[in-house]
Amino acid sequence: MAELSTDFIPCMLLPLQQHYLLLPNTTIAEVIPMPRITLADDKPSYYRGQYQWASHKITILDLENLVENEEGHSDEANKLCIIYSINSDTKLQAYALPCHGAPQLIHLNETALKLVDDDEKTSEFLHCRTHIGNKIAYIPNLDKLEELVLEHR
């Protein structure tokens, strides 16, 4: 019989408009109150603007808009989650996602993750959707998000 892992990973559960975002704690630089951001009219609807953070101009993307392909309400978000780049071979330091409330620190192991079983085509920007208790959380494809951020720099 296979031995079950008891290793727990500290993660942050961030509320989006309709779902949650699940990220390893180490990828999050900080979560701040929503600042004033520089908007752009000539960008796709998932592009929310830019923000000057720690001497870097960072791009803000609306993840739910990307995944669901519909207009989001990220302008109603009250927090900004700043995420470190995971790819050291790019010049990208960080980028940001709007969120709708305070993040929650949770510790998970693989037995706590229950994949959402549906026939819906998943987005290239998600690895999967999972149940965390009674919530549905996105586990994003950070590589694809970073590629998209680099396209809009």
Image (cartoon, grey):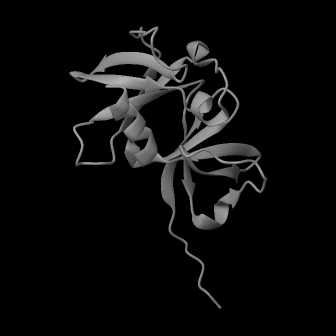
Residue 136 in the image, given as x and y percentages of width and height: 71, 44
Foreground of the two, 153 or 20: 153
Vertical comparison of 30 with 34: above or below:
below
Residue furthest toward the bottom?
Answer: 1
- x 65%, y 67%: residue: 111
Give x and y (percent) for residue 79: 51, 21
Q: Quadrant of the N terminus?
A: bottom right
Q: Residue 36: tell me if it is visible.
A: yes
- In the depicted view, which residue is nearer to us: 105 or 79? 79
Residue occupying the point 65% across, 44% down: 137
Pick the quarter of the image with the C terminus.
top left
Question: Can residue 28 be seen in this snapshot?
Answer: no
Residue 89: x, y in percent? 22, 48
- At 65% from the left and 30% from the top, the residue drawn is 69
Q: Position of residue 65 (x, y in %)?
A: 61, 28
Extreme residue toward the front, this view? 42
Specify whether 51 is left or right of 48. Answer: left
